[in-house]
Image: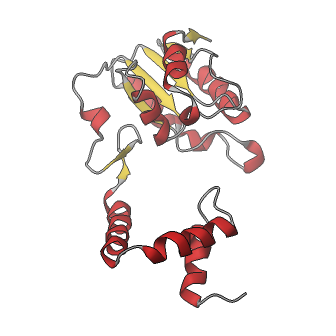
Amino acid sequence: MRYPIAIEKLMRLLNKLPGVGRRTAERYAFDFLLQWKDEELVDIQSLLQEIKASIKKCDVCGSLTDADNCHFCSDTTRRRDLLCIVGSCREVYAIESTKEFRGTYHVLSALLSPLDGRGEEVLELGKITNRILSSEITEVIVALDSTLEGDTTSLFLKQHLEQFPVKVSRLAFGIPVGSALEYVDGGTLARAFLGRATF
């Protein structure tokens, strides 16, 4: 079956989204996007361009922002003695939704995965070291996924942080093994934060 070239290109682009196969891309194209009004299509086009142009990573913590420093780093009411290391920007918002953590964040670029060629250089340990040495951090909370990569990265960070006079803790293991933080319900995530333990 041959679609018009523009529709075929649209379906190929939609197919790049996670969880969107060929049939779902076809349905999105025909049942939704082709049915939208012209102004709605213009809105989504301009929004995608705006996001690409205006959203960047915070120079301090690595979270997403549209300013020089993100909302979390510029908030003067946050506790500067607590640093929470997470694996992605989405996890910052998952943790924030619990309203249990009022410290600062550090977002890693990637987790360790030797099989995928990601060694310790992806952790950019110099940035973490500089933050500890140049601030009043007394506790570092490692809040990474309970997966092979997350566990490996957590242990590596623990060993690296032992040289500093900071308490190192990890979220309690109430989080199901193999799950991503963004999919854990708020109650479980809040309990995991409250029950974090030194490791």
| Residue drawn at the location 24% of the way across and 34% of the way down | 74
Residue 52: image x %, image y %?
Answer: 38, 63
Rendered position, 163 above or below 124: above
Rendered position, 66 above or below 146: below
Colour treatment of the image: secondary structure
Q: Nearer the viewer, residue 103 or 100?
A: 100
Residue 45: image x %, image y %?
Answer: 37, 72
For the image, the number of numbered tags is 0
Residue 170: image x %, image y %?
Answer: 57, 18
| Residue drawn at the location 52% of the way across and 14% of the way down | 191
Specify the quadrant of the image occupied by residue 39: bottom left
Specify the quadrant of the image occupied by residue 119: top right
Residue 111: image x %, image y %?
Answer: 62, 39
Q: Quadrant of the C terminus?
A: top right
**Residue 15, can we see it?**
no
Q: Residue furthest left?
A: 76
Specify the quadrant of the image occupied by residue 2: bottom right
Q: Residue furthest right?
A: 115
Q: Quadrant of the N terminus?
A: bottom right
| Residue drawn at the location 23% of the way across and 22% of the way down | 77
Looking at the image, residue 127 sits to the left or right of residue 56; the answer is: right
Looking at the image, residue 26 sits to the left or right of residue 191; the answer is: right
Q: Nearer the viewer, residue 145 or 68?
A: 145
**Residue 176, can we see it?**
yes
| Residue drawn at the location 47% of the way across and 77% of the way down | 34
Rendered position, 174 above or below 7: above
